Image: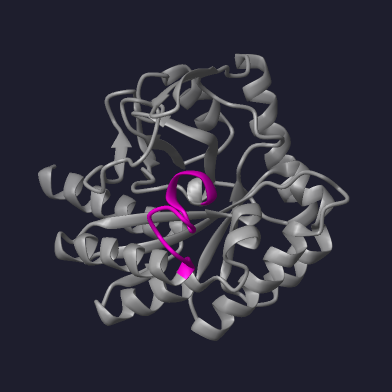
Amino acid sequence: MSVLLLGYDVETQDPDSPVTRQFLEVASRVHEEMEAPGTFFLCGRTVENNTEALIETQKTGLFDYQSHTYSHVLFKCLWQVNDEGERLVRSGSIEQIAEEVDKANRVLKERLGVTVTGLTTPWGYYRGLGDRPDLLAILHGNGIRFVRSWMRNEKDWVPNPLEVQPFFYECQGFPDMLEFPMTGRHDCDWSRSLGFEPREFDNVQDYAEYVAGQLEIVAEHDWAWPYNQHDHSTMRHDPEMVVIRRLIEKARELRMEVALYRDYYKQRMAEKERAHGAQA
């Protein structure tokens, strides 16, 4: 069965910014009205600045809370090639990354009472963390069992093809760690690469219909679609969350499941264990 996984990178770190609180209020209202679950991938520093607002969202019972590191340090270097040219974005050190993961876990436990099992890497990378078993070991040692890290194509740019689907890091030695590739376009590029005006899409409704069309392809192939938006880009370009509303509506029209990342992970692990049991 095809599935839509709604995830949000909540990462605004300016303590004086109202963006995250505004986003959380709108997201709670939209998800309650649509009766749909969603997952917040939270920077620890953002949690520290918005603890009360996040606790308020817990009252809905619709959201899961996972990590987006403490302060958004990159795991891998990016060598981006696109129409604007080339640029290199450097990663943090191994020591920095380990501290980022551990500190975020502690903040989410202390402030929200949640035990983190999932993480979204900042920016995302081509082939995810498949070529970095050392980083996978850091995550696994910190209790992470699912990760969103494959978000870009071979040019470290977008879109990432829809056919790149969730998989376990078996070859790397972590058979219980599931990768959720984020495919398609990135909402952070709405204003620059996508529109809304005067580029490819005239307005947010047009973009919402484009995204709904992508969902038709996902449903046709029985795929999973880990869809992502950010707190800051949402409030800047789609403050009423028109795109999310349309996605949920379309998923239900197509009889797709709308699920939490943690629940889909549990489902995949159960399937994996049944398959191993049948082979024994």
Side (left or right) of 278 relative to 45: left
* Towards the viewer: 232 or 167: 232
Residue at image point 63% right, 23% down = 97
Query: Is 127 situated left or right of 234 in this image?
Result: left
Q: Position of residue 167 (x, y in %)?
A: 29, 41
Q: Residue furthest left?
A: 279
Q: Is residue 49 above or below residue 238?
A: above
Which residue is at a point 46% across and 41% down the rendered structure image?
147
Question: Quarter of the image containing the C terminus?
Answer: top left
Report the residue at 33% width, 76% height from top. Answer: 250
Q: For the magenta stretch, what is the residue range?
A: 191-204
Left or right side of 125 for 143: right
Is 88 covered by the magenta stretch? no
Give how far across and how far down residue 202 sits, in percent: 44, 64
- Residue drawn at the location 83% of the way across and 51% of the way down: 49
Please identify the quadrant where the N terminus is shown: bottom left
